[in-house]
Image: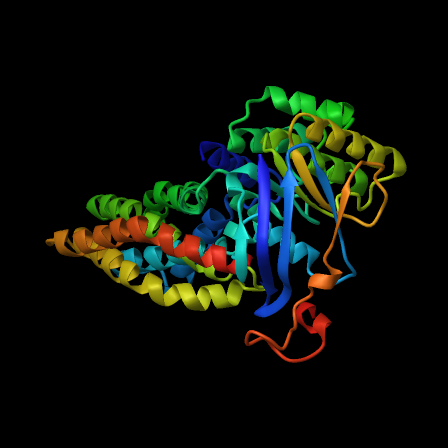
């Protein structure tokens, strides 16, 4: 499984934010996505996940190989932690055995029967990340996965990523903290698009995110 | 896709899920109307099909803004959009869940509420049949409206304004068939037209609503 991105351009709200982006993500590889706030990291990840069409260029990986985790964890507060994961296991057809493994991996076994509403922010995040294991998809696109995680949970997460890539998976992670992973760096700062081009609005870069 | 339906049904019966909201609203309308128009049995029986149809329609409208909004706000819709489920299937399941939690209880309760409105035997039967055939269209059309307004904060009012005109044909034919049926005259024509609207909306709306969601997720 290999994702090759060629000459990709992405837009947000009709304003081009990144252009001329080319990189490859091979099995067993972790790429860390860097760039200042508002530089288009989230937009890039959403485009790669197939949630929005690219402005230009191509992404070689099929959407079926990709799973995406964003700022929102997609948890239902009235369902228990286990029910939340079981739902995603059924949606992805991966069987209920993976749910136990995912709960174990993110140290959530003791919380499995609790409604998601009663979990702390960090516990919710861990549950959201456990969903990645349940999907069974090889390419992980993660947008600031460590928000509200403590040091121990970050280590837990880094270990999960390490195991995933050792199994032939790959991950593209937008993060600003050091995960202790062997990872390449993809800095998008140099690929910022000219907001005046391609019929975009005029004005400062951040205006697209107002 | 069945997993999605089961989850939606489960969410609707848990705390804050809103199951029974439409039914309670429907009951309030049916109980209040006789107070408003007076206790004349003949008059009530004459206006009953129309009142009950309007009540069912408004009860359907009440829960529409929840169809996609909750999943949008907590990020589930993004994740479902990247899941193996086709967006059209997602729309179908959402509409079906809405009908099962809102439309079906209204259909089953309508004959009982019809009695409160002095509706007689054949009238009750026709009310039941027209609502059973018409409420799926209300859920489908409403799901389309919900898909159009999914990203909007406080989109409920806009949703009502968008959906109400689209509900009018279903209301006209449904209430007309129920009224004719209650009066014992030929009612097949409005009934078939309404069934046509239902069949057409079930066939076409998943594609339109799926396209609307894809655009709103960008």
Image coordinates for residue A202, horizontal then vertical, percent? 64, 80
Image coordinates for residue B218, horizontal then vertical, percent? 55, 59
Vertical position of residue B122 compared to residue A82: above or below? below
Foreground: B184 or B62? B62
Foreground: B216 or B139? B216
Vertical position of residue B23 compared to residue B84: above or below? below
Residue at 25%, 45% in the rendered image: B129
User: Residue lying farthest bottom?
Assistant: A202
Q: Quadrant of the N terminus of chain B?
A: top left
Image coordinates for residue B104, horizontal then vertical, percent? 38, 42
- The image quadrant that residue A68 belongs to is top right
- Horizontal side, residue A75 vs residue B186: left or right: right
Image coordinates for residue A55, horizontal then vertical, percent? 54, 62
Residue at 59%, 38% in the rendered image: A2
- The image quadrant that residue B170 belongs to is bottom left
User: Residue lying farthest right?
Assistant: A151
User: Can residue B118 be seen by looking at this rendering?
Assistant: no
């Amino acid at each position: 499984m290999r994702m090759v991105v060629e000459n990709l351009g992405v837009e947000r709200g009709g304003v081009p934010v990144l252009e001329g982006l080319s990189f490859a993500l091979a099995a067993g590889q972790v790429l860390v996505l860097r760039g200042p706030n508002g530089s288009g990291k989230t937009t890039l990840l959403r485009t790669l996940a197939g949630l929005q069409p690219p402005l230009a260029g191509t992404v070689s990986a099929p959407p079926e190989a990709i799973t995406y985790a964003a700022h929102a964890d997609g948890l239902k507060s009235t369902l228990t932690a286990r029910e939340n994961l079981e739902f995603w296991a059924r949606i992805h057809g991966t069987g209920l055995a993976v749910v136990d493994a995912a709960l174990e991996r993110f140290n959530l076994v003791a919380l499995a029967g609790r409604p998601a509403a009663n979990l702390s922010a960090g516990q919710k995040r861990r549950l959201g990340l456990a969903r990645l294991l349940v999907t069974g998809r090889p390419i992980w696109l993660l947008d600031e996965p460590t928000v509200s995680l403590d040091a121990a949970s970050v280590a837990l997460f880094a270990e999960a990523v390490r195991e995933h890539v050792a199994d032939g998976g790959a991950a593209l992670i937008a993060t600003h903290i050091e995960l202790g992973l062997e990872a390449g760096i993809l800095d998008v700062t140099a690929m910022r698009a000219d907001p005046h081009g391609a019929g975009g609005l005029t004005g400062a870069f951040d205006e697209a995110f107002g | 896709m069945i997993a999605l339906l089961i989850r939606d049904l489960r969410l609707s019966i848990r705390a804050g899920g809103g199951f029974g909201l439409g039914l309670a609203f429907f009951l309030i309308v049916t109980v209040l109307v006789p107070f408003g128009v007076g206790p004349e049995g003949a008059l009530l029986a004459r206006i009953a099909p129309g009142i009950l149809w309007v009540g069912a329609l408004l009860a359907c409208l009440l829960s529409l803004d929840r169809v996609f909004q909750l999943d949008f706000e907590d990020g589930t819709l993004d994740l479902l959009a990247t899941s193996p489920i086709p967006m059209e299937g997602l729309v179908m399941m959402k509409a079906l869940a809405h009908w099962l939690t809102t439309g079906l209880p209204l259909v089953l309760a309508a004959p009982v509420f019809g009695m409160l409105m002095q509706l007689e035997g054949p009238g009750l039967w026709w009310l039941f049949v027209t609502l059973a055939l018409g409420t799926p269209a209300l859920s489908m059309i409403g799901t389309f409206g919900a898909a159009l307004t999914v990203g909007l904060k406080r989109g409920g009012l806009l949703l009502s304004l968008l959906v109400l005109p689209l509900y009018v044909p279903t209301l006209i034919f449904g209430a007309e068939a129920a009224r004719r049926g209650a009066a014992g005259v030929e009612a097949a024509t409005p009934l078939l037209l309404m069934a046509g609207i239902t069949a057409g909306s079930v066939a076409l709306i998943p594609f339109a609503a799926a396209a609307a969601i894809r655009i709103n997720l960008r």
